[in-house]
Structure formats: C-alpha cells, structure tokens
Amino acid sequence: MEGKEEVVTLLFYNRLFLENPQMREMFPGDIKQQAEKLAEVLKLIYSSLDNLDSLRPALRDLGSRHLREHGVVEEHYLAFCQTLIDTLHETAGTRFDSAAKQAWSSLLARVSSEMQDKAHETGRLTKLLNK
C-alpha cells in the first residue's frame, strides 16, 4: 500500500458504498478528505504494530465518537474490515497472499475490537444515565 495510499483508500470507499449503500450517509463530506484521513490512520496503525497498546486510548476514543456521531455498530465494523481486506487484495494482487490476509485480518479485528469496546462502554453508560 505504501505510496498508493490515496488510490487504495478511494477504491476502498467506492467499494464500501457500492456493497453497503446505507453507509454512504455516514460520510457526508468530501470522500477524498475522508480517504486521506483513513490513509493517515492506517499508516499510524501500521507504524505502531510493535506497540499497538499505545494506541488503545486513541482507538477507544475514536470508537466512542463513531458511535455517538455516526451510529457506527458492529455490522459497520465488519463491512469496513471485509471491504478493506478485499481492496488490499485487489490492489496488491499476488503480494497479498494468505499470510498477508491473515495478518491484516487479525490487525483489523484487534483495532475494531478496541474501538467497539469503548463504544459499548459509552452506550451502556448512556443507557444507565437515561433510565
């Protein structure tokens, strides 16, 4: 993906919205800007592979904001992860072998789990406070 981040992330969003049109409304702004943000986040995660725990607070905050501002739930994370895997496979071709697929799948599962953990905590707290 290195050097092709913008192309990969734009292809990703095109595929995501084609396969999940209901998710388009979650991204009301310029999709090119959103693609740039995603590329930056992916670079940060990739550069932190040896110390992902250091990103835990930021990922949990991001998950909380995604739930609060966009209504992101588990099915959205699943669609996001699968679409990103498919896009990486499409753009990397034979370099995206089974080992790369497994590595990316594990990484995305861990990241989305962290994001959802905080979102679930926030949702439970909101429900308790609104009783």
Image (cartoon, rainbow, N blue to C red):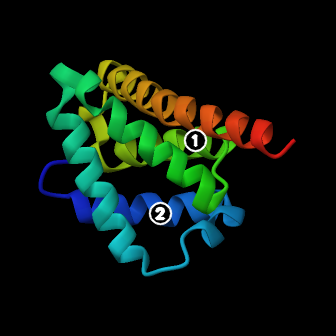
Quadrant in the rendering for residue 5: bottom left
Residue on which disc 1 sits = 77
In the figure, residue 33 lies in which quadrant? bottom left
In the image, residue 35 lies at what x, y percent? 35, 65
Task: Give the answer, above or below, for where 21 lies relative to 75.
Answer: below
Residue 84 appears in the picture as rendered: no
Percent across and percent down for residue 49 are 20, 26
Labels 1 and 2 touching (C-beta < 8 A): no
How many numbered marks have been drawn onto this rendered protein structure? 2
Identify the disc placed on residue 96: none
Q: Amino acid at mark 1?
A: Tyr
Residue marked by disc 2 = 13
Q: Which secondary structure lies at badge 2?
A: helix
Q: Residue at x 47, y 26 (%)?
A: 109
Left or right: residue 88 compared with residue 76: left
Disc 1 secondary structure class: helix
The residue shown at (46%, 29%) is 114
Which residue occupies 34% across, 56% down?
Answer: 38
> For the residues marked 1 and 2, what is the alpha-carbon distance in whole angstroms?
14 Å
Location of residue 123 with respect to 49 vertically, above or below: below
